[in-house]
Structure formats: structure tokens, C-alpha cells
Amino acid sequence: MKLQIKLIKSPIACLQVHKDTVAALGLRKVGQVVVHEDNPCVRGQIFRVKHMLDVKEIND
């Protein structure tokens, strides 16, 4: 299973650790969508910045 992750809120006014987490997920602009494998590391990153993301599960 994979996760489709969309950035819906700008990280400009957020903590530096949140900015770094969004960048580590590969997101740069609001509205950008990336697809990652579903694993505990990615789930932890998503949990940290869940207020800025829209996440959907997609099947291969």
C-alpha cells in the first residue's frame, strides 16, 4: 500500500522542525502531491505535521 500526501497549509509560520519534516517528505509548495510507501517512518513524519497535510491510502 502507498500513501498519497498533499500539502494543504504553508509551513512558513511553523516551527523549524515542522519545516524540516515537510521538506523530508519531499513537499515544497502548497498543493503539491507526493506518493510514499506506507511504513512506520513515513507514518511518524505524517503524524508530526498532520495539521498541514491531506493523506489518502492508495492501493498498488
Image (cartoon, rainbow, N blue to C red):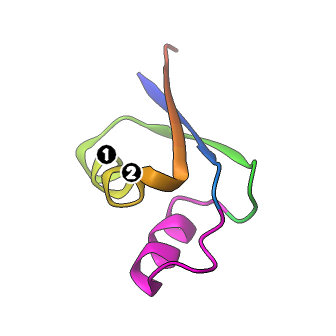
Question: Which residue is drawn at the image coordinates 48% and 77% (left, top)?
Answer: 20
The residue that disc 1 covers is 43
User: Is residue 30 positioned above or below 24 on the image?
Assistant: above
Question: Which residue is drawn at the image coordinates 74% and 49% (left, top)?
Answer: 32
Q: Does the magenta portion include 24?
A: yes
Residue type for callout 2: Ile
Question: Which residue is drawn at the image coordinates 50% and 35% (left, top)?
Answer: 55
Residue 58 on image: x %, y %: 51, 18
Residue stretch rendered in magenta on the structure: 10-27
The residue that disc 2 covers is 46
Q: Could you give the CA–CA distance between mark 2 and mark 1, rounded to whole angstroms?
A: 5 Å
Between residues 50 and 37, which one lies in front from this camera angle?
50
Mark 2 and 1 residues: CB-CB less than 8 Å, in contact? yes
Q: Does the magenta portion include 32?
A: no
User: Is residue 5 positioned above or below 17 on the image?
Assistant: above
Residue 1 on image: x %, y %: 41, 21
- The outermost residue toward the top is 59
Residue type for callout 1: Arg
